[in-house]
Image: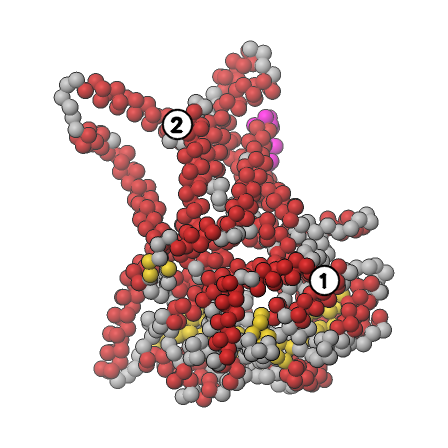
Amino acid sequence: MIMQEVVVTLSQSNTEHAILASGSERERGGKKRSRLERMKVIIAREKYLYVLALPGLLFFLIFKYFPIWGLALAFQNYSPYLGFWGSEWVGLKYFYDFFTNPDFLLLFRNTMAISLLNIMFFFPVPIVLSLLINEVRSLKFKKTIQTIIYLPHFLSWVIIAGICFIILGQSDGIINKIIVELGGQPIGFLTEPNYFWGLLTAQSIWKEAGWGTIIFLAALAGINQDLYEAAQIDGANRWKQMLNVTLPGIKSTIIVLLILRLGQVMEVGFEQVYLMMSSPVSHVADVFDTYVYRTGIQNGRFSYATVVGIFKSVVGLLLVVMANRLAKKFGEEGLY
Amino acid sequence: MKKRNWVTMLFALTLAVSLVGCAKGESKSAEGEAADGEQKPVEISIGTMTYGESPSSDLDSITQLNEELNVKLDIDFYPINSYKEKVNALLASKSLPDVILIEDIQDPAFSTATEQGAFWDLTPYIKDYPNLAAYPENAYENTKFLGKTFGIPRVRPLDGHESLMIRQDWLDQVGLKAPATMDELYQVLEAFTKNDPDQNGKNDTYGMAQASVSGYLMSMFGAGTTWKEQADGTLLPYWMTDEAKTALEFWSKAYADGLITPDLPVMKSSQVKEMIIQGKAGVAIANVNEAFMFGQELKKIHPEAELKAFEIPAAPDGKKYHEQAYGSYGVFLVNKLTVDEAKLKKILEVYNATADEEGYNLITYGLKDVDYTVSEDGSIVQTDEGKKKAYGTATTAQWISGYFNKYQRAEAPDMPAEVKEYNYKLIDAITNSSVVNPAAGLPVTEAWMERGGDWQKKFVDMYTNVLIGKSSLADWDAFIAGLQADANFQQHLKDTADSYKSK
């Protein structure tokens, strides 16, 4: 529902812009009104909307924009006791340290691999799931399924990691016990680097796929029922209806979510990786988030950790901008 | 991370403002005291860790102490699992309480702040407080920073944290005696794994339960406690010694033969206890008294079982090696931003009052005959009332420094006299062969502050991988050679050796 509203508002504001644009063109020949005056008029006309928007604006200003100055820590040798004003300025030292760190490429590879696997295999799952749920006729059955698949979302990663250890452990795990009963050799699922990325992706799907269907189901509910009727009259079966009515109906939602997801390509979920990480797999598991935790929080190198944070954000921003451009090129609305 | 920094900044700002407010308030109250003669209780805030619940600050024990010393204690308990992060965040936001427990004075974040004068130097004061001054010298020596005492050490026994816990009934079953050498240890592990010591007809036991790699596995071969002094008077990290490699060969072979729990890299220490009390493994490294404590639980399922603590077997050179502890676990630092000298003395008074047996028992177990009773053999038994109020060694005892009891790790509630006697003797024997860390109390090198975290992680990864056979001993040699060739690491070794020589 939320996404639906966003999409609707976006299109509305687009039309408003169009009206304004044509308005200013009309006035070009006559008396030129300054930008400021026009702003005043708009503000006066829409004053209640602006009042409504105020708390949100303040929130972003105070909690999101103001603290951006904290990024200046990256250029300091920040010491909590000396504080921001007392700490020594060191310029780009920590940026240099970070990019010349021999582990940089390893961290980058692991982060990207885990993230891309996630986008490739996890991202489509909620879409497929919600399409399936959408086809279910019995309302009771539908609600039951929904409730069950939402459930894992409310378990914390700690519990899921615990369950994984119980199921996949080498000396005590259920699966290995079965393998040994059948005469096989126990497999170190948790300590085998080749399985690690797959394990993470599978965990994500198990935990979040159900929850992910909410937005898509909302989008599905917003599709005009007349379209289905028309399709039926044209002789389309359910499969054809899905391909030609349902999917196009939620396409923009999928694209918006994909763009947003790309912005988080460098965030691979600290808790999950941290909990599943152990020495045998650490060369495939160490990502920027765990690195920041180790250097920044555990070793107290705040400035260095800030540099890593900035790097992550910049990459995320670039990806969002690129993905948005790409989406627009293919005739989609995109984010902005 | 970016988000976290924003929050930190904001915190820092708001707290800076509130701190200014606090400072003003305090000076005012100090004046008030002088004026009306009747002293107001001194408010003292303390931050410490808890292994369980967070007890409240209005327990009877605290009220009693408050009245005795004319103070008002406000104690915050932070869970052990995220303690370090919590304390680092408090430091970063300048919102540390008056007294804060930190696990290691050499921790980079705190050592920098200490150097910059964030905490009181207690060196000139300790001698005025008899109970604190009575702590063993090592407890102070090992927690010194820049040659000064900045923290009140939470005093702990020097020995007894490292012993070999073995199933005596399994030994009898397979016809072996407690191992005296490493070869014998290997035989025991092998017999426990392969000879069905629990007689259930299934091959379902392990020789040893071990969670992740540990320094003990190497130091018992004579690799040294954290550092080892070399012939030329320099120091080498224990894991770079030849003995460490011998240990690696031993343990990687044991792992490959299936004598150790295969989950070693991902196991938590609580799982070691589970493996032992479920009768799935027969050997573990543990505190001396844990053999008895685990044994109690083990007997619930296997009444015939008997767990006993033993000395670590002799290394190939014929000597026994135990690691000697630092004599403390963590130190209490006193915040210079919020505490003046008068208040500092009050704080030391509080710690002095709780640093003898009486004070310790009051804080740890509460009021006698209400929260705990003393049984005939002199051991303390907590009442349900006491347990309900969250008194105990895992909780309330965490905010005081306590008193020194050499045999603390030999004792446990309800322990029969003969076990206690056996354990006392064991601790005496361990004391004869325990090795102190030669670098204890030395400053952390600059190179370590910058790169120590990375080195430590790479070492633990390599150690684990060689032990479980994912990497070879040749990889290990290459790893050590790589560090030998690393200029930064050499600088770290050189600086450590220099400060050791000038100690």
Chain where mark 1 sits: B
Q: Which residue is mark 2?
A: A8
The question of residue A134 being in magenta is answered with: yes
Quadrant housing residue A146: top right
Q: Residue at x 84, y 65 (%)?
A: B195
Q: Looking at this view, is B389 or B71 the one in front?
A: B71
- Does the rendering let one see residue B1? no
Give the residues in magenta. A133-145
How many neighbours does mark 1 have within 10 angstroms: few (below 14), some (14-19), or many (20 or more)? many
Overall secondary structure of the magenta section = helix
Q: Is residue B487 above or below residue A142?
A: below
Badge 2 and badge 1 in a common chain: no
Which mark identifies residue B233? none
> Which residue corresponds to mark 1?
B252
- Describe residue B427's horizontal placement relative to residue A335 as left or right: right
Cα gap from disc 2 to disc 1, whole angstroms: 63 Å
